[in-house]
Image (tube, rainbow, N blue to C red):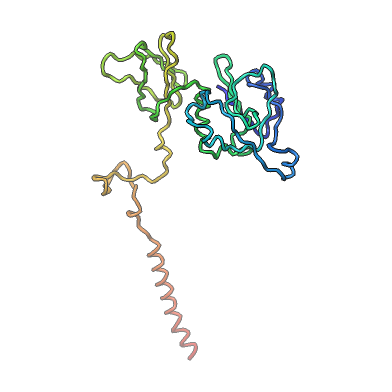
Amino acid sequence: GLCVAMGDQVQPADPNAQLGKLLPRALRDVRTAGDAAASDEGVDSRVALVTRFDRGHAILQPFVDTSRSSLARIGVARYMLLDPSPDAQGEVVLALEDGTPYLLTRPVDRGRVALLTGTLDRDWNDLPIRPDFVPLLEQVLRYLARVTSSEGRAFVVGQPAPLRVDDPAVARVVVEAPRGQRTTLDRPTDATPWQVVDTSAPGLYRVAPDPPLEGVAELPGFAIGLDPLGSDLRAARAPTDSGDTPVASAAAPGALGPEGRTELWHAALLGLFFLLLGEAALLHPRKTRAAG
């Protein structure tokens, strides 16, 4: 899958020459919403709105009512115009109020391409601050990757991952690890869970029937991530015997909370006070004798 988005550095001639066979339509020029001349002078700040949706497209399936979602409140200040063509390819998922395509998709051989005529940041639009921005991108990526379902549970490196194979015709699968290693696993004949034990590499694991079965698509894979505890910068706490009272632990020496610290600045201030008081007492008799 390939996702293409626009930006200030995009010159239409370059992507047309390099990606022309993949893009749903050829890029033409950048347009400013409203009256272009007035916008340059700062007079007209009107933005275009996304008002047209292909509700039958797979990307928009999870959105119950797109017209009442935050997608219908996207303000577009600039966008890329596309060349009109009588044999235009692809499907228009999102379009502006005047019918200008904003998000298009196109199948190419065994792959898919998505073209966004705006930017993925706030330079040309306010899409990134809309609540449905992340769900929309998730659906675009699912569409490009041909993923119809995913495992909601998060797995970390070293943790066994269960295989979700509901089709009884699949008795054996091949699991491809992120680095290309392939492992063949047979369906257990007893109550043993069917799972992948070797998850030492983070990334996406693909699962497919072995041998391939007619009418059986690629099975749902899973992702293995790094343990988030490795990024936790908070101070470690000693284990407790009852959940309330910290106990000593050789595994975490010096892992003391604020109650275990010894503050020294109080003693330092007190010592400085007595030092100044002593100095004043020594200087006072000398001033008395000098005055006499």
Given residues 189 and 63, the one toward you in this image is 63
In the displayed structure image, the side of residue 61 where residue 241 appears, left or right: left
Q: Going 56% across and 20% down the picture, which residue do you hit?
A: 112
Residue 22 image position (x, y, % from top left): 63, 19
Q: On the image, which quarter does residue 107 sit in?
A: top right
Residue at the left extreme? 242
Given residues 69 and 236, the one toward you in this image is 69
> How many labels were placed on the picture?
0
Q: On the image, which quarter does residue 240 sit in?
A: top left
Instruction: Indicate the quadrant containing the N terminus: top left, top right, bottom left or bottom right.
Output: top right
Seen in the picture, residue 7 relative to 188 is either above or below; the reply is: below
Q: On the image, which quarter does residue 242 sit in?
A: top left
Given residues 111 and 181, the one toward you in this image is 111
Q: Going 60% across and 24% down the picture, which residue do you hit?
A: 92
Residue 57 image position (x, y, % from top left): 53, 23
In the displayed structure image, the side of residue 221 where residue 70 appears, left or right: right
In the displayed structure image, the side of residue 57 where residue 33 appears, left or right: right
Q: Going 37% across and 59% down the picture, which residue do you hit?
A: 263
Q: Going 69% across and 19% down the picture, which residue do you hit?
A: 85
Residue 82 image position (x, y, % from top left): 68, 26
Seen in the picture, residue 129 relative to 150 is either above or below; the reply is: below
Seen in the picture, residue 24 relative to 241 is either above or below; the reply is: above
Residue 222 image position (x, y, % from top left): 42, 24
